[in-house]
Image (cartoon, rainbow, N blue to C red):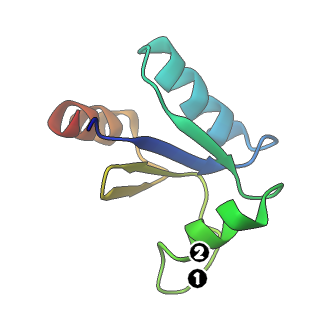
Amino acid sequence: MATEIKLYGAEKCHKSQYYKRYFEDLNLNYTFLDVELNEVDAEALRNLYKNRKLNFPTVTIGEKKLRNPSDTDLKKWIEKLL
């Protein structure tokens, strides 16, 4: 099974939009989870953090969690995990 990319964010968040474009420019399949519109997605994001805050944007690549990653970090983990 392929490693799954998830983007936890909000439609109105400019950083969330940035990551969406980033993945689309690289032709990567990802799932966008709007934590402001969907309580199930918000709860899933809270479960990723001990403080249970809605820390978005957060990208997960398989089991790896990246909070608001730089392009360099994101590229490194994509290359490592995909």
Number of other residues with Cα within 10 Å of mark 2, as a class: few under 14, some 14 to 19, many 20 or more:
some
Q: Going by the picture, which residue comes out furthest to the bottom?
A: 51
Q: Residue at x 61, y 58 (%)?
A: 56
Q: Of 76 and 1, which appears nearest the observer?
A: 1
**Relative to 36, is 32 on the left or the right?**
left
- In the rendering, at what x and y percent does residue 16 appear? 64, 40
In contact (CB < 8 Å): disc 1 and disc 2: yes
The label number, if any, that marks residue 61 in the structure image: none
> On the image, which quarter does residue 27 sit in?
top left
* Type of amino acid at the residue the image marks with label 1: Arg
Q: Going by the picture, which residue comes out furthest to the front?
A: 1
Q: How far apart are marks 1 and 2 (CA)?
A: 4 Å
Number of other residues with Cα within 10 Å of mark 1, as a class: few under 14, some 14 to 19, many 20 or more:
few
User: Dot 1 lies on which element?
Assistant: loop
* Type of amino acid at the residue the image marks with label 2: Arg
User: Dot 2 lies on which element?
Assistant: helix
- In the rendering, at what x and y percent does residue 41 appear? 66, 60
Q: Residue at x 46, y 26 (%)?
A: 29
Q: Residue at x 65, y 72 (%)?
A: 43
- In the rendering, at what x and y percent does residue 59 appear? 46, 49
Q: Earlier in the sequence, mark 1 or mark 2?
A: 2
Q: In which quarter of the image is the C terminus?
A: top left
The label number, if any, that marks residue 46 in the structure image: 2
Q: In this view, does 21 lie above or below 50?
A: above
Q: Quadrant of the N terminus?
A: top left
**Relative to 45, is 29 on the left or the right?**
left
Q: In this view, does 74 lie above or below 37?
A: above
Q: What residue is pinned by disc 1? A: 52
